[in-house]
Each structure stands twice: as structure tokens, then as C-alpha cells.
Amino acid sequence: MFRFFGHPAEEDMEVRIPEKCLYGLYTGVISLAGLGCLPFWILRIRRSLIKYQGTVAQRFGQLPTTLCQDLATRECFWVHAVSVGEALAAQGLVEKLHHLFPHWRVVVSTVTKTGQQVVHDRFAHVDHTLYLPLDLPWIVRRVVARIRPRFVIVMETELWPNLFHALERAAIPIILVNGRLSPRSFTRYRHIRWAMARFLQPVHLFCMQSAGDAERLRQLQAPSHSPQGEPSPSPNPAPNSTYPQRMCVTGNLKYDQALRLPDPTAMATLRQRLGAPADPIWLAASTHPGEEEIVLDGFSQVRQQHPDLRLILVPRHPERTGTVAGIISRHGLPFSLFSQTRGSWPQPLLLVDEIGWLTRLYGVARIVFVGGSLIPHGGQNFLEPAAWGIPPMFGPHTFNFKDATQQFLAARAAFQVADVNALATTARMLLHNPAQRDEAGQRAQDCVLAHTGALERTVRAIQAILTPHISRDGKDASTPLAGHHPHTSSDKVEHGPHP
């Protein structure tokens, strides 16, 4: 086991690694990896110019002039959400935080361009957006100095050691929200626990989705060896119960987000694009490479008994539209592009090539398959169709939604399919038996309702840790941040001005 200078001695620690060497090692590794992958990234940017256009400068720390000028005189808080799913989960939280700190600017960063578009389209109270800079110390230090956030919210599983270290050196609280750590990720990370413990140290509060996630993360921060394999969690605490080391279980924000159904105006906009098709619709949502072929084969099988069935296919990444269109053509299926629909949809298949419509499209579907699950990706969010009262179908690879999968299958509120034959069989069953489909849909909706409340629990946990540090009107409180753990390295720490 490795240890860091300045940390209390442990009996099983033999090799000492100075903190500066650890961060230097991490920076060196990612720098070399970046240089090695540079030809690949140049080729990828050239092939997907639209996807990366306007993002490169910000990734190297060149922030918009308007942002820098505004934040030079205004307080702000910063929320980071890597992509679409994390951004949607953060939407309600951003609104709550804006209500708590109404005079502060709101800054949201993402990694993907689709995440940025979701923030622009769906968030009402965001003043500035940016692409997260590369996690190199000279870049993130400059960005932190320009933004000067009072606190930073990081959604789910994002870990950026140099950024976290820069925020720590500036005495800026970091709160990880909707945190999760799958058994598979834990198995990988436990081999570098000696590094993970230090990289996670700057985080003031971990709001975890489940007791299992909290226990796995706790063991990553434990100073001594643990048994091989996945840890056995302590007796499952109720949400909002507190773990040692700045950790609490607040539940999954995606349950709360799923209940934010589109308003009538949004649905009217969809009808202007699609009309009001009376035929039954199968929606295949958030599909990944290798899944479109399975869905199309299943669709062709089911259409033999249901010739009026229509398919809406929504690839997870819209930049794959050309590739997916080629797959559809090879299957001999006529299709329309969503971007070209103007009040009608004459073909049996609709390929969605725009983002921001999926939640509304669930409202016109009769049966739904949620992708990322027939291949070992981990699954996409199936709580949204469930909130509409549609029992989702998904594949066997749903480790990103392990707890939700167990809950839905136990309640007979979802259908897990292993291959194209099982997918087609289940789709036929749901179309043949509307009463059974509606009962399963009601159970799915009940499952979502039964597990809401994470947003309020998360807001209370954030308030509890920030209130001693920041007063209601945004002024500093005289007492230190609750739960603040002092920096314990013997390396000198240069704290910047208090944010």
C-alpha cells in the first residue's frame, strides 16, 4: 500500500509517495496519453467538425470574454454535468440552487456539445455555459481563477484530480451529487486506491444514489486493505442517512427528473412536426452501435403480425445519423428524417436526427425499447418512459441503473430482453395485450413515484454543509464550512483569496 507524506502512518503502508509526485505522475500520464492519441483526435475532429466546432479553445482554458467580464464582479456557483443525462438530472437542482442564491450567476459546464444544447434548451436560470477544460494543472488553475465560484457541484461519477486540486487550493467547496460507483468500476479503482483516496480528498460532500454506491466509495477512501472483490455494504440505510467521511445517501435525482413531463406547449410543437399518427408506434430510444440492427430485425418480425406498426429510431448520438441511415437502407425499410418532417410522417420508420425531442416522443409511443443495454454500455435512462406509464424494454447490460433495474423487474414494471427474438416476442406480447401493457405501465409509473424525493434530500444536504460557510444572502458566515477537513499534506498549500 502507498501513502502520502503528511498523512497518519498506517501499519500496512510501506511506500511513500509525496503529493506533488502523485499529481505530477497523473499529469504526466494523461499528457503522454494525449500526445499519443493526438493523430486520432485530429482525424476525429476533421470527420466530426460540427461536433467539435467552437469547443477547442475553451478546452484549453480560453473562456468567453463576456463570462470573464461578468464574473469579475459577480458571485457565482458552478455546476458540472458531463453530457445529456447528467445535465437533465441537474436541471431541478440548478433551479433550487438559483432560488437559494438568486443574486448569484449560474455557470454550467459540460464535456459534450449535446449536453450544452440541453442546458441551453431546458435550463431557465443559467447565465454562462462552457466546455470543461482539459484536466491539466496550468489550464484548470487559470479557469478556476477566472470563474471564482463560491462552490462547485459535480454530477455523478466525474473525477478530475487536477481540477479538484485547484479548487481545494483556492478553498472552494466541491460537492458530488447523484454519485454512483458500480461494482465493475470499484473493482478497477480499488487497485489504485492509494491514488483515489487523495484525489477524492478535496470533495467536501458526497451525495450518493444508494447505500451500495456509498459503501464502495467509502472503501476506496479507506486507508487499509479490504477483502478482495466488491465490499459488502453495511445494513442498508434509508436515504439521507449519513456515512462517515463526508458521505450521505440521498437517492437518484433521475427519478425526480423523470416526472418533469413536457408541458402542453411542448407537446403541441411535437404535433406540428409529426401530426397525430393513429397507428401504434414503437420507440427505440438512445440506441448505440450494434443495437440498430437488432431493433430493425425485431421491428421487421413484429410487422408481420402488425403491418400498421411504425418505428421511431432515436440514436444516442445524433452525429451517427448518416451511419444509421445506411443501416436502415440496407434493411430495405423506407424512412423519413425528423428534421424534414412538417406536419406529416408518411414512412413506416422515422429517424430522429435532432436532440431535445426524446422526452416528448415518449408521449406518442405505445411500446418503448431503451438502448445502451443490448451491448455492454450499461444502459440509458428508462425512467422517463416509465414516468409516462410505458413499461420499458431493455437488454441485459444495465449496470449503470443496477438498483432501478432490480426494482422495476421485481415489480414486473419492465421487460428485460436478451436478443432480437426476445425483443420481438415481448413487443408482440405488449401489442397483443393492451390491458397487460397498461397494468405494467401503471406499475412502472408507481415505481418512479415511490423513489422520488432525492432532489429535496440533496438540497437539504447541500444546505447543511454550505449554511455555516455562506449566509442566505450570499455573504460569508463567520463560522467555517461544516465538515471541512483540513489539508493534511506537508506540502505547502497556497490558498487564493476566498471565493
Image: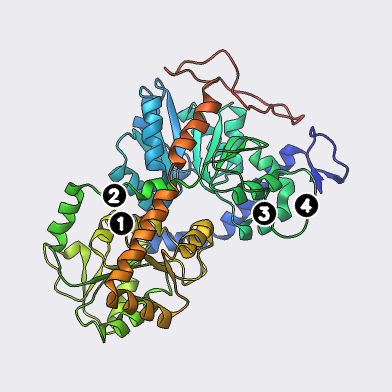
Query: Label 1 neighbourhood size at 10 Å, few (<14), some (14-19), many (20+)?
Result: many
Label 2 sits on what residue type?
Leu
Q: Which mark is residue 388?
A: 1
> Is the residue under label 2 in contact with that under label 1 (CB below 8 Å)?
yes
Estimate the x, y position of residue 41 in percent, counting from the top left: 48, 59
Q: Considering only order in the chain, which callout, 3 or 1, is on the residue closer to the N terminus? A: 3
Between disc 1 and disc 2, the foreground one is 1
Q: Which mark is residue 261?
A: 2
Label 1 sits on what residue type?
Trp
Label 3 sits on what residue type?
Tyr
Whether residue 382 is visible: yes
Between disc 2 and disc 3, the foreground one is 2
User: Distance from label 1 to label 2 (Cα)?
Assistant: 8 Å
User: Distance from label 4 to label 1 (Cα)?
Assistant: 43 Å
User: Distance from label 3 to label 4 (Cα)?
Assistant: 13 Å
Between disc 1 and disc 3, the foreground one is 1
> Is the residue under label 3 in contact with that under label 2 (CB below 8 Å)?
no
Q: Which residue is mark 3?
A: 189
Say which element carries label 1.
loop
Say which element carries label 3.
helix
On screen, residue 324 versus residue 380, left or right, reads left
Q: Which mark is residue 371?
A: none
Query: Label 3 neighbourhood size at 10 Å, few (<14), some (14-19), many (20+)?
Result: some
